[in-house]
Image (spheres, rainbow, N blue to C red):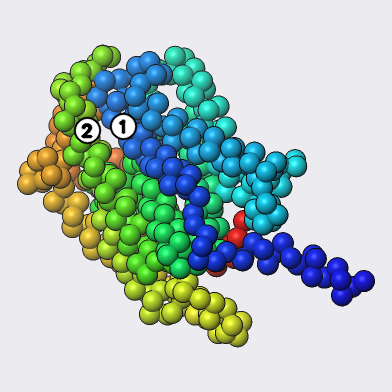
């Protein structure tokens, strides 16, 4: 009895992993990635709309693009779940997760729940603006719901593409790895939008900026470097973020705009672009180099056969090295590049210096100086000191550790 039942119980697991060269990515894998790109593009466009025109109807093009980014992947995954549940092969059902009898990959369920949160935030946001007017900050309650929904949508797409990367072989696996890496880059771009009020160039001589980026970005780059089958995955993810933001920096000002709400202190006549992107590609490249130096790239399972103690020491060394290089390079690059962005030399179409201020901000010398360095303003006083650097380093260590743990777990994702 035992000899017969054991193979039957383990067969679904073997079936999940038994994808060979003739298997390819499903066509909707490309569609969900393209839809995912609508999220950072749409939210950046929406912020520009608020800064250039003001509060408008809900059915602005920017809002529509955001909802496309959430609804389209959810619909495609819902169709995938319907087909798998009722018409799927035994192998397809084995590679799915059951939810109330319906079967779909784990990432599909995460995306569908995220899309539901995004749709819920839409009427909430409309009511919030009608009741309280313009948002003072990006992170308002309805925007927080929207942000969590967008994060879930992106994570679901990541997990879906990851499951295919981990099961496919040959060229199909390489294609899945590319899509997975690009999805991480889109998630970096999405996250950067919600961190915008903490990452202005004017804040990059204060400690809060370095704490924020050290806590938020290493986790994604470490996941890319560890879980993706691409050799320079973290660099490609950072490059994807940079391309998305530069696209919006250079394209948005080409469209005319006119403020509709008072007071108007800065009469813009075009769509306000976002600030120039952070130069994350440099520390991301360093992270890739660390993973290749320590032979922690996902080109096989050799690292998993080493003794537990040796793996633990290697992981600790990697985390500490990632934190040092990420924070150290950011301090050198952002500290100096922010000086350039606040100078007259950056006031052009290429760097968009001094062009990202909203119509309701009063022009002044505050636009060209660093904030948080005046001790007379105790509430905003935030100079960069050694204590702040130490806290930022601890943030980078925690973020990198979580990224490595998630990256190691992602190596096993098959469903």
Quarter of the image holding residue 321?
Answer: bottom left
Q: Nearer the viewer, residue 397 or 284?
A: 284
Disc 2 marks which residue? 252
Local crowd size for mark 1, using a 10 Å CA cut-off: few (<14), some (14–19), many (≥20): many
Q: Residue at x 16, y 40 (%)?
A: 352
The residue sitting at the left extreme is 345
Q: Nearer the viewer, residue 371 or 336?
A: 336
Q: Position of residue 272 (x, y in %)?
A: 22, 31
For the N terminus, the quadrant is: bottom right
Q: Position of residue 173 (x, y in %)?
A: 46, 63
Q: In the rendered view, does 97 fall on the left or right side of 178?
A: right
* Extreme residue toward the front, this view: 22
Neighbour tally class for label 2: few under 14, some 14-19, many 20 plus, Cα within 10 Å: some
Question: Which residue is located at x 66 percent, y 47 percent?
Answer: 88
Residue tagged by mark 1? 45
**Element type at mark 1:** helix
Q: Is residue 1 above or below residue 277?
A: below
Q: Residue furthest right?
A: 1
Asked if labels 1 and 2 touch by Cβ distance under 8 angstroms, the answer is yes
């Amino acid at each position: 009895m035992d000899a017969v039942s054991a193979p039957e119980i383990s067969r679904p697991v073997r079936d999940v992993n038994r994808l060979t060269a003739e298997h390819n990515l499903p066509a909707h894998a490309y569609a969900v990635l393209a839809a995912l790109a609508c999220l950072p593009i749409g939210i950046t466009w929406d912020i520009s709309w608020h800064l250039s025109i003001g509060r408008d109807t809900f059915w602005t093009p920017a809002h529509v693009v955001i909802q496309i980014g959430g609804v389209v992947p959810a619909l495609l995954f819902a169709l995938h779940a319907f087909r798998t549940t009722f018409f799927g092969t035994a192998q397809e059902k084995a590679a799915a997760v059951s939810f109330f009898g319906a079967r779909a990959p784990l990432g599909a369920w995460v995306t569908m729940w995220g899309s539901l949160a995004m749709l819920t935030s839409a009427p909430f946001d409309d009511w919030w603006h009608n009741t309280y007017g313009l948002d003072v900050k990006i992170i308002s309650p309805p925007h927080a719901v929207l942000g969590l929904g967008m994060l879930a949508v992106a994570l679901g797409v990541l997990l879906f593409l990851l499951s295919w990367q981990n099961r496919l072989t040959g060229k199909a696996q390489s294609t899945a790895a590319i899509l997975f890496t690009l999805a991480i880059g889109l998630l970096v771009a999405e996250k950067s939008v919600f961190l915008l009020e903490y990452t202005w160039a004017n804040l990059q001589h204060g400690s809060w900026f370095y704490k924020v980026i050290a806590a938020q970005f290493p986790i994604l780059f470490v996941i890319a470097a560890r879980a993706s089958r691409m050799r320079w995955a973290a660099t490609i993810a950072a490059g994807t973020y940079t391309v998305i933001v530069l696209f919006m920096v250079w394209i948005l000002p080409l469209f005319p705009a006119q403020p509709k709400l008072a007071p108007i202190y800065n009469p813009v006549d075009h769509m306000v672009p976002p600030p120039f992107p952070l130069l994350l590609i440099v520390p991301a490249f360093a992270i890739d180099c660390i993973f290749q130096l320590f032979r922690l790239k996902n080109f096989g399972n050799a690292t998993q056969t080493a003794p537990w103690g040796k793996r633990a020491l290697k992981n600790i060394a990697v985390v500490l090295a990632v934190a040092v290089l990420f924070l150290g390079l950011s301090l050198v690059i952002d500290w100096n590049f922010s000086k350039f962005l606040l100078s007259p030399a950056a006031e052009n179409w290429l760097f968009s210096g001094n062009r990202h201020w909203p119509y309701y901000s009063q022009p002044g010398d505050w636009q060209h100086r660093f904030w948080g360095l005046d001790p007379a303003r105790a509430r905003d006083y935030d100079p960069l000191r050694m204590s702040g650097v130490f806290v930022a380093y601890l943030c980078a260590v925690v973020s990198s550790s979580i990224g490595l743990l998630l990256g190691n777990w992602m190596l096993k994702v098959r469903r």
